[in-house]
Image: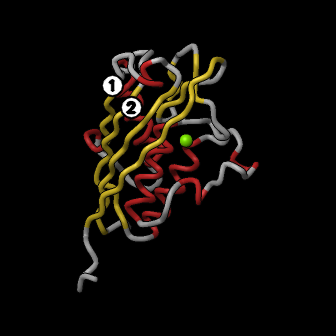
Amino acid sequence: MYDQEPMIRVGLGFDSHRLVPGRKLLLGGVDVPSPFGEKAHSDGDVLLHALCDAIYGACGRGDIGEHFPDTDPRWKDKPSSHFLLEAGRLAKREGWRLVNVDATILLETPKLSPWKKTIAESIRRILAPVWELGESAVCIKAKTMERCDAVGRSEAIVAHVAVLLESGGS
Ligand code: MG
């Protein structure tokens, strides 16, 4: 134990979903046009799920599945913005402020470059009731898997997210 509690905390989030026809491809709350989307109990927003895990992890509060179990009918097709807002509220209650979000989405197709800014803005908007984030505080990056593995075959999508929290949430 340190004499003083740390002033900053890092959090790491990961999520993946299968891609299936007839579902929306939701990323950071944005409906990205695509012939297939995430199969899931909730709306399947892989980026918001990874972001929730990063925030919960930085707070030392487990993962999204502990807070919103996918066996609970209340969360069926629930907008993932609800989960993110709740994760943010918990972090703020515990005295944390979000410094920045850095995310990488792994998706073979469609190309996400035209959507990255819109997705970042959407995340800032979802979190606005909790924290006011500057434009550079949310960075969305996108990569393909060069046609390798399940992502490369367009069978799956993956998101990695890092967050930094600092004390002084109110
Ligand atoms: Mg998920």
* Amino acid found under the numbered disc labelled 2: Ile
Ligand 1 image-quadrant field = top right
Res 115 quadrant in image: top left
Disc 2 marks which residue?
105
Query: Which secondary structure, mark 2?
Result: strand
Label of residue 152 in the image: none
Above or below, 169 relative to 123: below
Q: Secondary structure at mark 1?
A: strand
Task: From the top left corner, tell me how far across and down residue 159 is, in percent.
Answer: 42, 37
Q: Can you tell which quarter of the image residue 139 is in? A: top left
Q: Residue 169, percent across and down?
A: 36, 66
Image quadrant where residue 112 sits: top left
Q: Residue 72: horizontal and vertical position, in percent?
A: 73, 52
* Tags 1 and 2 touching, CB below 8 Å: yes
Residue 73 as seen in the image, left or right of residue 139:
right
Q: Residue at x 57, y 29 (%)?
A: 18
Placement of 112 over or under 127, stated as above or below: above
| Residue that numbered label 1 is attached to | 143
